[in-house]
Image (tube, grey):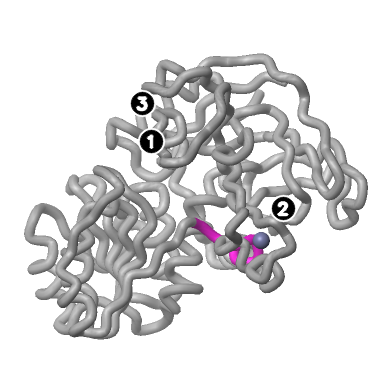
């Protein structure tokens, strides 16, 4: 098969088209012919060697999978050759107590597609059948390619963990990003008052069009939020990891900060008193469970939530896509298509 991968860690230029043996499915596994994928910040961490886990080289990144089942291994009963499928980003061991209750994101032996395994920058990808979701009608291939990781993460953060509903207040850092553009739409659809943070007024206007009730810019974000919401917000979604103390300060008493990534480095500092004296909590979310992705996609199909796809490129131009995402000029997502 053809794949875009890398033989050493580094900048976008290390991404090259390579030839690799076709994967074959083992028991419980399927091979999916990938139609499209999308670029996530995760891919940048994996490619640059800063993800924080050992990744054997060469490696093929790509966490989002939408494609057609090409080959089915022994014992697979719930999908067949020719089925259109998407993959959840994480799958578990299938046998621990977390997996038994559908919480594979907590499985100590979980795998991340495109990190622990070769991913969807390859035209074929091998996955356990238990990672797959059959998408609802009404979502296009390019939409589905942009949804599993970013939208699944937004869903788990807001719906499962944040329990956002009518009357909730939600603050979203880096709202113009992949997760952010989904989080704004989803929080709005769930009935929340949505405050979005971004850097440029142009992106701010686009976020308002997506459903943000207010947009904040600049360095005095906490003061701007205090002027909008008297008591602090119910849920702060922080995809950046750079503003943990500000996030805690903006949460209402008993409020929640959802931590789900880092931009400037993996360490954060905060005054622990600001957390416990007001009964606030920080919860980590990596991405969705499979059942959450299935629910999230149904909800999106029904409620008109769609990815904001800034550009669609052939997968061979993955290096260009990575450079674009690193430039900070992307609003929403970049989709990569397999020819
Ligand atoms: Zn498990």
Magenta span has 103? no
Q: Where residue 138 sits in the image (x, y, percent)? A: 65, 55
Which element is circle 2 on? strand
* Quadrant of the image containing the C terminus: top right
The correct choice, above or below, for 188 with respect to 39 in the image is below
Characterize the local packing of mark 3: few (<14), some (14-19) or many (20 or more) Cα atoms within 10 angstroms: some
Which badge, 1 or 3, is on the more N-terminal residue? 1
Q: What mark, if any, has residue 162 been given in the picture?
A: none
* Residue positioned 67% across, 19% down in the render: 2
Q: Circle 1 sits on which residue?
A: 50
| 11 or 226: nearer the viewer | 11
276 lies left or right of 60: left
Q: Nearer the viewer, residue 211 or 241?
A: 241
Give the image location of residue 90, x and y in percent.
60, 52
Which residue range is magenta in the image?
287-292
Q: What is the spatial separation of the Cα atoms under label 1 and label 3, in whole angstroms? A: 16 Å
Which tag, 1 or 2, sits closer to the chain's start?
1
Would residue 43 be seen by someone viewing this image from the given angle? yes
Residue placed most toward the observer, 116 or 129: 116
Contact check, label 1 and label 3, Cβ < 8 Å:
no
Mark 1 crowdedness (10 Å alpha carbons): few <14, some 14-19, many ≥20: some
Q: Is residue 315 shown to the viewer in this render?
A: no
Circle 3 — which element?
helix
Secondary structure type for disc 1: loop
Residue at image mark 3: 323
Q: Earlier in the sequence, mark 3 or mark 2?
A: 2
At horizontal 40% and vertical 63% (from top left) the residue drawn is 284
**For the point 53% across and 61% down, which residue is it?**
304
Point out residue 320 in the picture as x, y percentages from the top left corner. 41, 22
Whole-angstrom CA distance, mark 1 to mark 2, is 28 Å
Q: Nearer the viewer, residue 325 or 24?
A: 24
The residue tagged 2 is 132
């Amino acid at each position: 098969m053809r794949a875009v991968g890398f033989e050493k860690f580094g900048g976008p230029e290390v991404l090259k088209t390579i030839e690799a043996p076709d994967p074959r499915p083992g028991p419980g596994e399927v091979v999916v012919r990938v139609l499209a994928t999308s670029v996530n910040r995760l891919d940048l961490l994996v490619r640059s060697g800063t993800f924080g886990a050992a990744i054997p080289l060469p490696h093929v990144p790509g966490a989002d999978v939408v494609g057609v089942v090409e080959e089915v291994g022994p014992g697979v009963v719930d999908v067949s050759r020719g089925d259109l499928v998407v993959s959840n980003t994480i799958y578990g061991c299938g046998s621990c107590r977390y997996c038994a209750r559908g919480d594979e994101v907590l499985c100590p032996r979980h795998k991340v597609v495109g990190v622990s395994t070769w991913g969807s920058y390859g035209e074929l990808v091998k996955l356990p059948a238990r990672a797959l979701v059959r998408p609802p009608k009404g979502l296009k291939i390019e939409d589905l390619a942009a949804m599993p990781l970013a939208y699944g993460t937004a869903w788990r953060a807001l719906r499962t963990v944040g329990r956002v509903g009518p009357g909730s207040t939600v603050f979203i850092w880096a709202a113009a990003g992949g997760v952010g553009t989904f989080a704004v739409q989803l929080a709005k659809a769930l009935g929340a008052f949505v405050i979005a943070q971004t850097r440029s007024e142009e992106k701010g206007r686009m976020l308002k069009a997506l459903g943000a009730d207010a947009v904040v810019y600049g360095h005095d974000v906490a003061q701007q939020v205090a002027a909008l919401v008297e008591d602090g917000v119910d849920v702060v979604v922080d995809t950046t990891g750079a503003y943990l103390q500000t996030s805690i300060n903006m949460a209402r008493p008993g409020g929640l900060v959802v931590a789900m990534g880092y931009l400037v480095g993996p360490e954060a500092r905060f005054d622990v008193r600001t957390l416990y004296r007001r009964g606030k909590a920080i919860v980590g979310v990596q991405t969705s469970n499979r059942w959450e992705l299935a629910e999230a996609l149904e909800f999106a199909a029904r409620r008109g939530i769609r990815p904001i796809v800034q550009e669609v490129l052939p997968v061979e131009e993955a290096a260009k896509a990575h450079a674009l995402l690193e430039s900070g000029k992307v609003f929403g997502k970049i989709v990569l298509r397999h020819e």
